[in-house]
Amino acid sequence: MTLNPAYEAIGKGFVQQYYALFDDPNERSKLVNLYNAETSFMTFEGMQLQGALKIMEKLSALTFQKINRIVTSVDSQPMFDGGVLINVLGRLKTDDDPPHAYSQTFVLKPVATSFYIQHDIFRLALHDSL
């Protein structure tokens, strides 16, 4: 395959769609459609998960109800298989917790005329200070 010339638009559009679903507790369950049943991987705060069901179990177990998210930057790169690598830097505040910076990286894998999330890595930018 060749590099996808629309990688930047795909990355920005995907991030908007993903966070619109994730940030609404009533819509979050629809994220299952973005992951593959077997070949999607997620690392969530160091916890490794494989497959849409395991990923959704983790996302469904999150207890916060309100999310205030600011996306600072979305950086995308084309991949040689037609996929898109996306890195998101932002800040989020859940319920009454203080805001925290975060980083999330996605690899979108092409399938037919669309994509699925092949890899998803999420990490809050928390540092131990002694």
Image (cartoon, rainbow, N blue to C red):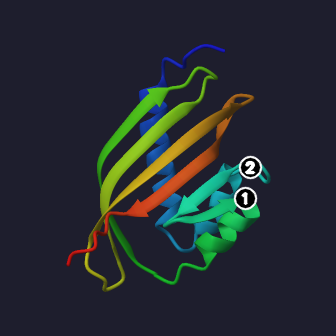
| Image coordinates for residue 130, horizontal then vertical, percent | 20, 78
Label drawn at residue 79: none
N-term-proximal mark, 2 vs 1: 2
Please state which of residues 129 and 73 is positioned toward the viewer in this rendering. Answer: 129
Instruction: Name the outermost residue toward the front.
Output: 130
| Image coordinates for residue 74, horizontal then vertical, percent | 35, 41
Q: Splitting the image into 4 quarters, where does residue 82 fall?
A: top right
> Which image quadrant: the N terminus?
top right
Mark 1 = which residue?
52
Residue name at image x 21 percent, y 75 percent? 129
Residue name at image x 66 percent, y 64 percent? 55
Q: Residues within 10 Å of mark 1 (few under 14, many from 20)?
A: many
Mark 2 = which residue?
36
Left or right of 24 in this view: 68: left
Q: Are marks 2 and 1 in contact (CB under 8 Å)?
A: yes
For mark 2, give the secondary structure: loop
Q: Amino acid at mark 1?
A: Ala
Q: Is residue 70 visible?
A: no
Q: Residues within 10 Å of mark 2 (few under 14, many from 20)?
A: some
Q: How many marks?
A: 2
For mark 1, give the secondary structure: helix
Location of residue 95 with respect to 79 vertically, above or below: below
Instruction: Name the outermost residue toward the right.
Output: 38
Q: CA distance from mark 2 to mark 1?
A: 6 Å
